[in-house]
Image: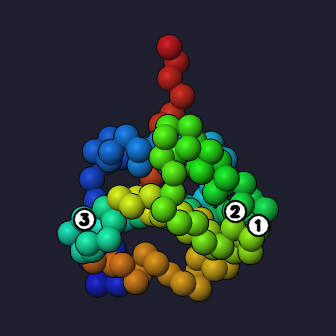
Amino acid sequence: MDETEPRKAGLAADLPPDVRDVLGVLDEGKGRSLVVLDMRQVSGFTDFMVLCSGRSEPHVRALADAVDKHRRQRGSKPAHIEGRAEGCWILMDYFDLIVHVFTEHNRDFYQLERLWRDAPLLEWKAAPPSDA
């Protein structure tokens, strides 16, 4: 494995329900390149980071708003939200979970996956619809 590439983590089913819920909201909103960084062994400030790209600044804001609405409906308010007005990179801090929603340009520029390459990485794929 190339040392610049993050290690792969476990399965999405192994993630806490709150993290899976956020991934589902972002997927439903057509977020791109959904990734989870497992920060538990490399950081003391959060357990997980979710990274997502949007097609445009309005799309980035819509994705972040959907996550915020979903979390608030479940009684979880963010400690801090940054970047909502600009819409290029919105950071939402829920203590044990930090959500980053970027435009593709900003995600490529800041390369958080590379910055936190010591953190196990999970590329999330939506579950196929059930036939039941």
Q: Residue at x 63, y 79 (%)?
A: 106
Q: Position of residue 110 (x, y in %)?
A: 54, 84
Q: CA distance from mark 2 to mark 3?
A: 26 Å
CA gap, disc 3 and disc 1: 31 Å
Above or below, comparing residue 58 to residue 27 in the picture: below
Q: CB of mark 2 within 8 Å of CB of mark 1?
A: yes
Residue 128 in picture, x, y percent from top left? 51, 34
Residue 113 left/right relative to 68: left
**In terms of secondary structure, where does tag 2 sit?**
helix
Viewer-nearest of discs 3 and 1: 3
Q: Quadrant of residue 4?
A: bottom left
Q: What SS does tag 1 mark?
A: loop
Front residue of 113/66: it is 66
- Residue 60, numbered label: 2
Task: Indicate the position of residue 114 as horizontal and vertical percent values.
Answer: 41, 81
Q: Name the residue at 50% across, 37% down.
A: 74
Instruction: Please report contact status of discs 2 and 3: CB closer than 8 Å, yes or no.
Output: no
Amino acid type at mark 2 = Val
Mark 2 closeness class: few <14, some 14–19, many ≥20 residues within 10 Å: many
Are there few (<14), some (14-19), or many (20+) residues within 10 Å of tag 3?
some
* Residue 101 in sight here: yes
**Residue hosting label 1:** 56
Image quarter hosting the N terminus: bottom left
User: Residue at (41%, 49%) from the top-left corner?
Assistant: 19
Q: Tell me, for residue 40, which label it has, or none.
A: 3
Amino acid type for the residue under numbered disc 3: Arg
Q: Residue at x 59, y 50 (%)?
A: 67
Mark 1 residue type: Ser
Of pointers 2 and 3, the one earlier in the residue sequence: 3
Q: Is residue 122 left or right of residue 32?
A: left
Badge 3 or badge 1: first in the primary sequence:
3
